[in-house]
Image: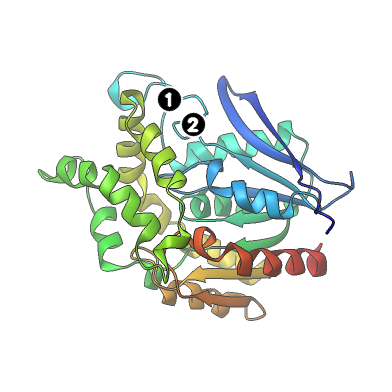
């Protein structure tokens, strides 16, 4: 039986505004293949897309950067603790925009997940001409998509006496593993590599303050929801939504809400949790491939 060619994945770093960003990039068979920008979530990195890149990397140029303070990218000292770097979603979007320009990505499919949604939607509203299509996987842009647990964390401020305790609980191995396995249909389909890798980076002392800063800044995303929804209504990007319906943070109503602004969006719900690709990659990857082929 012939074996399908395994795609070449390159692992590179690039300096963007004085910050070294690590990224993974597939090398497709066709130099003119469609481009997909994959934006990761919390507490992950581009590592979360490793299997998707193996599945689709022959046919598409998949590009997945690590944000500052995540994965293999630099973690410059936070301004909150005396450093010079501001960990905010605006700043992450600045660097991703610089990354896109440095790689000369003139047009691409935008894949957003978790933290990748506020980063990606900022980029889309700043540079709508770059977006050839949108793939949303548990990436929220609507108030009804926020669970009570998510709303509780978003409401935290540095002045809350229990803020540190609650954030530290979220940064433990137990909670990182729960984000991968929670809500899944079959936990045995979830490889331990994801939460193990994530926890390695979360436990590095220089990464801690970055996570605090981004948690406290998350409420800035809610203030942008109306702007992002207006972009969706105005530009009507071709949209594919693949959503783990048992996500404890971003709930199914958040997935369905996209249909208000992009009625033609294709919605697929899966009986799994937050990291839907970890359990349902065999089902989701063909949907993505078909969507790209019809959209590009």
Instruction: Say if mark 1 contacts mark 2, CB within 8 Å.
Output: yes
In the image, taking residue 58 as reference, residue 71 lies left or right, namely left
- Please state, as top left, top right, bottom left or bottom right, where the N terminus lies in the image: bottom right
Q: Position of residue 259 (x, y in %)?
A: 57, 79
Numbered mark located on residue 85 in the image: 1
Bin the neighbour count of mark 2 within 10 Å (Cα to Cα): few under 14, some 14-19, many 20 and up: many
- Is the residue 16 above or below the residue 163 in the image? above
Q: Determine the residue positioned at 30% across, 38% down.
A: 212
Secondary structure under tag 1 reads loop
Q: Could one spot residue 128 in this view of the protein?
A: no
Secondary structure under tag 2 reads loop
Pick the residue in front: 191 or 63: 191
Pick the residue in front: 182 or 78: 182
Q: Determine the residue positioned at 64% across, 53% down.
A: 52
Q: Determine the residue positioned at 62% across, 72% down.
A: 233
Bin the neighbour count of mark 1 within 10 Å (Cα to Cα): few under 14, some 14-19, many 20 and up: some
Q: Determine the residue positioned at 85% across, 56% down.
A: 2
Question: Hey, which residue is sitting farthest left in the picture?
Answer: 161
Lower position in the chain sequence, tag 1 or tag 2: 2
Question: Residue at label 2?
Answer: 68
- Is the residue 111 above or below the residue 269 in the image? above
Q: Distance between the residues labelled 1 and 2?
A: 9 Å
């Amino acid at each position: 039986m012939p074996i399908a060619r395994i795609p070449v994945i390159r692992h590179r770093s690039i300096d963007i505004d004085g910050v070294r960003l690590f990224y993974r990039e597939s090398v497709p068979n066709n130099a003119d293949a469609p481009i997909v920008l994959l934006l990761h979530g919390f507490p992950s990195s581009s590592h979360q897309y490793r299997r998707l890149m193996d599945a689709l990397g022959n046919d598409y140029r998949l590009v997945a950067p690590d944000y500052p303070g995540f994965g293999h990218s630099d973690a410059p000292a936070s301004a909150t603790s005396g450093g010079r770097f501001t960990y905010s979603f605006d700043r992450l979007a600045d660097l991703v925009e610089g990354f896109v320009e440095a790689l000369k990505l003139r047009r691409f499919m935008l894949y957003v997940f978790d933290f990748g949604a506020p980063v990606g939607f900022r980029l889309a509203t700043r540079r709508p001409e770059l977006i050839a299509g949108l793939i949303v996987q548990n990436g929220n842009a609507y108030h009804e998509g926020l669970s009570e647990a998510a709303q509780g964390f978003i409401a935290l401020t540095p002045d809350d006496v229990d803020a540190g305790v609650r954030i530290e609980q979220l940064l433990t191995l137990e909670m990182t593993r729960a984000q991968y396995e929670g809500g899944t249909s079959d936990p045995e389909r979830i490889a331990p590599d994801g939460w193990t890798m994530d926890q390695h980076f979360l436990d590095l002392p220089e990464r801690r303050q970055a996570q605090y800063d981004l948690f406290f800044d998350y409420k800035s995303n809610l203030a942008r929801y109306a702007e992002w929804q207006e972009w969706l209504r105005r530009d009507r990007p071709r949209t594919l939504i693949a959503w783990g319906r048992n996500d404890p943070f971003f709930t199914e109503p958040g997935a369905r809400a996209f249909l208000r602004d992009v009625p033609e969006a294709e919605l697929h719900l899966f009986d799994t949790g937050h990291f839907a690709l970890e359990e349902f990659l065999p089902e989701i990857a063909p949907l993505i491939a078909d969507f790209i082929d019809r959209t590009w």
